[in-house]
């Protein structure tokens, strides 16, 4: 009798498990894995301390949403990410989404460069399965910590069929953002991440509410694939401002880069004294990509700068840090200016 009851319970449990999606959480560090000295330390803490198994064990609500497994890929603050970290993480995501027993992937990440990693994965992972990048602005030890709900929302979205085919997503502060569009816009609030074109939707009490979908190429529709990328192209950014000296651009040109992102004021404006410096870079075979330091809007081609004449590329609406990611990926496939400009219009 007892054995029969135990068997029934086991079967029920197994059936319940089988009914739930399988989500893998890849942990990389950041504040979501941070720890402070006391509950009032919401901004003073050490990032990248709590291991993924402890993060998951501290959130039993996850088991209502999906069968969740954790992997510790790195344990670093995200300002220390490198191209090699991006490639290692991307290869692991690519391998997991190929597995029939994986329905979605979550990446826990520091918020400082979260937007770069999310865009990178958006460009190179060939899948329609949900991939959700998530972080937090406060460590789990702080009062009103945001990491637990952000992580629960991330797993909820990663486990959702209606999140498929929308590109890499970011869940922060109840919102579902496009990995392409989102940027960290406030560095000291839980409402930190914004997309100038708006969030894609929200997660509220375990339910996704969608209001728009991405229109730029991503994931399964991308011409780029992590599985055929061995190294990313070297691309650097020079931030421009009043009185900027050309020495910064000259030095960048000597560092072996394949492209320079000019982070200009306004519509990606280039100071008169800097134009010859950029022309010299172009003559050395270095691609010049005009981006804007202005948070919103997009750079117009051939407006104040004769891009056709100088053979320059414009970064469209991509901020310098995102333009670097796209250029680093695109240059693994082409060094042709017209092709690069097409890629910047499409991705
Ligand atoms: N060191 C920062 C990082 O890892 C902490 C910021 C955060 O994760 O919120 O990105």
Image (spheres, rainbow, N blue to C red):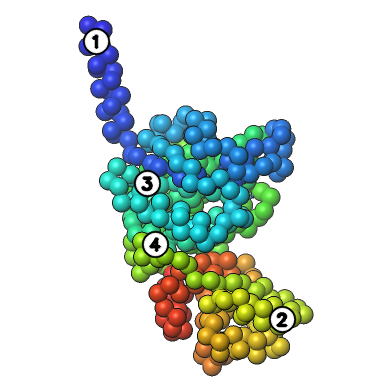
Question: What element does badge 2 sit on?
Answer: helix
- Label 3: how many residues lie within 10 Å, few (<14), some (14-19) or many (20+)? many
Q: Which quadrant holds residue 8?
A: top left
Comes first in the chain, label 3 or label 4: 3
The residue labelled by disc 4 is 226
At 59% from the left and 85% from the top, the residue drawn is 281
Q: Is residue 7 above or below residue 182?
A: above
Closest to the observer: 69 or 319? 69
Q: Where is residue 208 in the image (x, y as percent from the top left)?
A: 42, 45
Q: Nearer the viewer, mark 2 or mark 1?
A: 2
Query: Can residue 292 be seen in the rendering of this structure?
Result: no
At 46% from the left and 53% from the top, the residue drawn is 89
Question: What element does badge 4 sit on?
Answer: helix
User: Cβ(mark 2) to ligand 1 < 8 Å?
Assistant: no
Q: Which of marks 3 and 4 is in front?
A: 4
Query: Can residue 336 be seen in the rendering of this structure?
Result: yes
Question: Alpha carbon of mark 4 to alpha carbon of mark 1: how far?
Answer: 50 Å
- Label 4: how many residues lie within 10 Å, few (<14), some (14-19) or many (20+)? many
Q: Which quadrant holds residue 262?
A: bottom right
The residue labelled by disc 2 is 247
Q: Which of marks 2 and 3 is in front?
A: 2
Q: Position of residue 211 (x, y in %)?
A: 44, 55
């Amino acid at each position: 009798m007892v054995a029969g009851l135990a068997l029934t319970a086991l079967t029920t449990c197994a059936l319940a498990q089988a009914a739930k999606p399988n989500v893998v959480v890849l942990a990389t560090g950041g504040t979501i894995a941070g720890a402070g000295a006391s509950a009032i330390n919401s901004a003073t803490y050490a990032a990248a301390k709590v291991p993924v198994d402890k993060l998951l064990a501290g959130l039993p609500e996850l088991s209502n949403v999906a069968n969740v497994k954790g992997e510790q890929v790195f344990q670093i603050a995200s300002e220390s990410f490198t191209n090699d970290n991006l490639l290692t993480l991307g290869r692991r995501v690519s391998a997991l989404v190929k597995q029939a027993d994986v329905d979605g992937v979550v990446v826990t990440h520091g918020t400082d460069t979260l937007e770069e990693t999310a865009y990178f994965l958006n460009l190179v992972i060939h899948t329609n399965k949900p991939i959700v990048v998530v972080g937090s602005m406060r460590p789990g030890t702080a009062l009103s910590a945001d990491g637990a709900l952000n992580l629960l929302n991330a797993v909820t979205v990663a486990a959702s069929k209606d999140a498929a085919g929308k590109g890499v997503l970011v869940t922060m502060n109840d919102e579902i953002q496009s990995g392409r569009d989102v940027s960290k816009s406030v560095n000291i609030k839980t409402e930190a991440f914004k997309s100038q074109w708006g969030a894609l939707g929200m997660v509220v009490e375990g339910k996704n509410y969608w209001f728009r979908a991405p229109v730029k190429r991503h994931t399964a529709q991308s011409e780029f694939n992590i599985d055929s990328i061995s190294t990313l192209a070297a691309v650097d950014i020079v931030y421009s401002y009043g009185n900027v000296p050309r020495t910064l651009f000259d030095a960048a040109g000597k560092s072996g880069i394949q492209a320079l992102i000019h982070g200009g004021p306004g519509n990606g404006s280039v100071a008169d004294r800097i134009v010859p410096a950029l022309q010299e870079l172009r003559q050395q075979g270095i691609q010049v990509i005009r981006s804007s330091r202005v948070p919103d809007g997009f750079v117009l081609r051939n407006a104040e700068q004769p891009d056709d004449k100088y053979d320059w590329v414009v970064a469209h609406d991509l901020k310098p840090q995102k333009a670097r990611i796209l250029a680093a990926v695109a240059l693994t496939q082409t060094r042709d200016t017209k092709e690069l400009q097409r890629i910047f219009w499409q991705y």
